[in-house]
Image (spheres, rainbow, N blue to C red):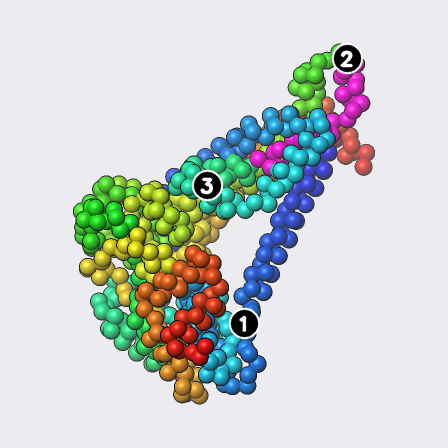
Amino acid sequence: MKNKTMLNRRDFLKIGGAGLAGAALLGVAGCGGGGGSGSSGPKVSVGSKKFTEQILLGEMYAQAFEDKGYDVTRKLNLGSEQVMDKALQDGTIDLYPEYTGTAYVAILGKPPESYPKTEEETYKQVAEYYKNRKDTQMQMLEPAPFENNYGIVMLTDTANEMNIKTLDDLAAKSGDLIFSSYSEFQNRSDGYDNMKQHYPKLDFKEIKIVNDLGIRYKALAEGEADVGIGFTTDGQLASPKLKVIKDTKVIWPKYYPAPVVLQSFLDENPDAKKILNSVDQSLNAKTMREMNGAVDLEQKDYEDVARQHLEEAGVIKS
Amino acid sequence: MNEFMNVLQRPDFIENVRIHIEYLVFATLIGILISIPVAILVYRSPSTSTAAINVGNIGRAVPSLAVLVLMFPIFGLGFDSALFALTLVAIPPILINAVVGLRQVSPQILDSAKGMGLSGRQILSGIQVPIAAPIIFAGIRTSAVQVVASATLATFIGGGGLGDYIVEGYQRNSTAIALAGAISVAVLAFITEAGFWGLERTFTPKGLRIAQKRGRARK
């Protein structure tokens, strides 16, 4: 009889395992779609990290290339900066979108405290590094005109009531407020400690660690927390009900997205630069928030969202 | 390795271990308090037993993460939402095993108990529950280990626990931090498994243990 229960349990594990394997397969199949259209134009392999904004950027680059007759391979669910950089070096991808600040810290390996105060200077240093790389030559093209930085967020009504406009105002009143944050931000050097250093009055009544972005926003809406942390291009921020509190002291590096492209690919395809730029220049913080929101909150297909934007902006033919 | 040790020495580490153990204890306990009475209510009739087992199986199929997110508007951020979801995780294995365990007590034994003049209640508490105890305990053990594993999800709704480190490791791309969380969970699961195995042995009636041994010897 003991055996019987063990069997039950094992069966359960087996079923669970099969379910997981099935889900994984589905996931792979889901991401593998949308390959080249079989044209015989020049080949390009577009990569991105696996979160919504990156996938959208990658997809938009891919569609813009297709529009100009390229044969596009999509690899839109790769991993971290390091993985992306390796994928470029071994030629798995020809390009991917990276944030200037991320490249500064993760690829150049510079300490986050040393970051330049302006976007221009950040870009200059990063671009120079890519250009002069010994291993594989790359270029970081001109960044898109919007930033995806940390965003300290409050309900617009609450912020107005308490007359909080800047992080200084927030710090002064933080003793009455609950902050919902996430593990990484609380523990990495440029995160909460950095914030506290620059705004010394900061001392929240309570800090709740909520490791899910969507639930952090929900917690704000439900009044479970007064202040939350997200990113400035989150889809939720398209709503006027939420407000990003101004960081007047510029305590974070500048995170503007820009394509990092293999030099060899640029040499072979002189029009590539123009194609990528046309995508980036069609974007701004508002459109990016709306697109992120369409995918994350309205569950729209990222391919459709990307196509709709590019057509409306006249980047590709409709 | 250094980073790994650093995590174990953080002031919040002990706190998170404590929260994780609280999830284990409370979710399993509430799970037992709900499942056993329900099992006793339904086991007599085949149709209600089947219904209970099916409900239990459906319960197993619902992802804990989904429950967490659904409970959020009711219980808010933190411990309560997570405990509710984890109790739902704990119930099915106990319920199913208790129903199956109570039903598989051999009719001959029940007949002889009746023949000795025992009342229904006496048969339940003196014969059926002890004979079913090993199976019920196997269910509780399964639940407890599942709760330990699932409690890592509490981190997504501000419930704390060792999942904090697993997610932090993932977010910061640091295997050391993620491992510090994952290995702690594994150790906790192992201790739970071993502890319940001991309990299971203690609660198996002596006669049953001898019968089990004989059965094994004969093979």
Read off the chain for label 3.
B
- Identify the amino acid type marked 1: Gly
Q: Are marks 2 and 3 in contact (CB under 8 Å)?
A: no
Can you identify the residue that label 2 sits on?
Answer: B116
Can you identify the residue that label 1 sits on?
Answer: A34
Residue occupying image coordinates x 32% and y 77%:
A142
Residue furthest out toward the top? B117
Does label 2 or label 3 sit earlier along the sequence?
A: 3
Query: In the structure shown, which secondary structural element does the residue marked by tag 2 occupy?
Result: loop
Visible residue check, residue A118: yes
Read off the chain for label 1.
A
Query: In the structure shown, which secondary structural element does the residue marked by tag 1 occupy?
Result: loop
| Range shown magenta | B91-115
Residue occupying image coordinates x 34% and y 46%:
A221
Label 1 to label 2: alpha-carbon separation: 74 Å
Find residue A24 and report its image quarter.
bottom right
Residue B182 x/y as whole percent: 48, 49
Read off the chain for label 2.
B
- Whether residue B143 is situated above or below residue A212 in the rendered picture: above
Visible residue check, residue A79: no
The secondary structure that dominates the magenta segment is: helix
Front disc: 2 or 3: 3
Residue B9 on the magenta segment: no
Considering depth in this image, is B25 or A156 the residue closer to the camera? A156
Query: In the structure shown, which secondary structural element does the residue marked by tag 3 occupy?
Result: helix
- Identify the amino acid type marked 3: Met
Can you identify the residue that label 3 sits on?
Answer: B71
Front disc: 1 or 2: 1
Residue A3 x/y as whole percent: 72, 38
Find residue A56 and report its image quarter.
bottom left
